[in-house]
Image: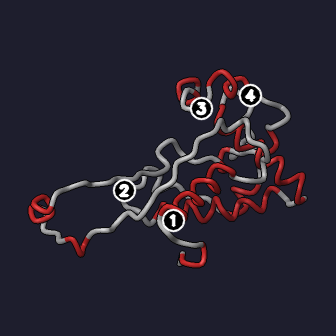
Amino acid sequence: ADFLARAAHYAIERPIDDFTFPAVFARRMKAYQEAHGVDLGEFAHFTVKAFSNAAKNPLAHMREAKTSFEQASTAGDHNPNFLANEELKPFLKVSDCSQVTDGAAALLLVSKEGLAKIGKTPADCIKVRSYGFVTNPLAQVKNLLEFESARQSFGQSLGDGGARVEDVG
């Protein structure tokens, strides 16, 4: 956990809990629950969907892992609230957390000759019109109910790409 916390703003965010990233997200869950009064167990729908989608990928790390709504919605020995931070502990269970191996992306940059070598044509390719990039310390956001950096990055991408929200399908 200490090693993974180095991907955060270590000096500011590490003291929140032994498990820095889960604690940062538990803060958001707490804020959402307090603002909207939702039963935290209802978030298990997301967990069940994530497990189901992972089972469809033959290369998924936890492909064989299964969970039910009942298992994911309740805390207990089978699905503990594991944070040491007592204020945040009730807001996150093991099943609410992604694996360290929770995703991947790849980008292959090749010349026209490279495309030919791999049996592709320019028509097979995706043109990147724009991208956005924003960073901020996860524990120092203005509003825990918003993803400010994602909103800013999305806005940059749209503007730079000459698109509007209405253009996105």
Labels 3 and 4 touching (C-beta < 8 A): no
Circle on res. 53 = 1
The 10 Å Cα crowd at callout 3, few under 14, some 14 to 19, many 20 or more, is some
**SS assignment at label 2:** loop
The 10 Å Cα crowd at callout 1, few under 14, some 14 to 19, many 20 or more, is few
Circle on res. 8 = 3
Q: Position of residue 114 (x, y in %)?
A: 13, 58
* Residue under pointer 2: 59
- If you read the primary sequence from the N terminus, does the residue marked by circle 3 or circle 4 appear first? 3
Give left or right: position of 54 versus 97.
left
- If you read the primary sequence from the N terminus, does the residue marked by circle 4 or circle 1 appear first? 4
The answer to which quarter of the image holds residue 18 is: top right
Closest to the observer, 129 or 140: 129
Question: How far apart in space, not on screen, are marks 2 and 3 (Cα)?
Answer: 28 Å
- Mark nearest the camera among 1 and 3 is 3
- If you read the primary sequence from the N terminus, does the residue marked by circle 1 or circle 2 appear first? 1
Q: Position of residue 126 (x, y in %)?
A: 32, 68
Relative vertical location of residue 10 with respect to residue 82 in this rendering, above or below: above
Q: Position of residue 131 (x, y in %)?
A: 47, 56
- Mark nearest the camera among 4 and 1 is 4
Identified by mark 1, the residue type is Asn
The answer to which quarter of the image holds residue 123 is: bottom left
Labels 1 and 3 touching (C-beta < 8 A): no
Q: Position of residue 76 (x, y in %)?
A: 76, 45
Give left or right: position of 149 versus 157.
right
Question: How far apart in space, not on screen, are marks 1 and 3 (Cα)?
Answer: 28 Å
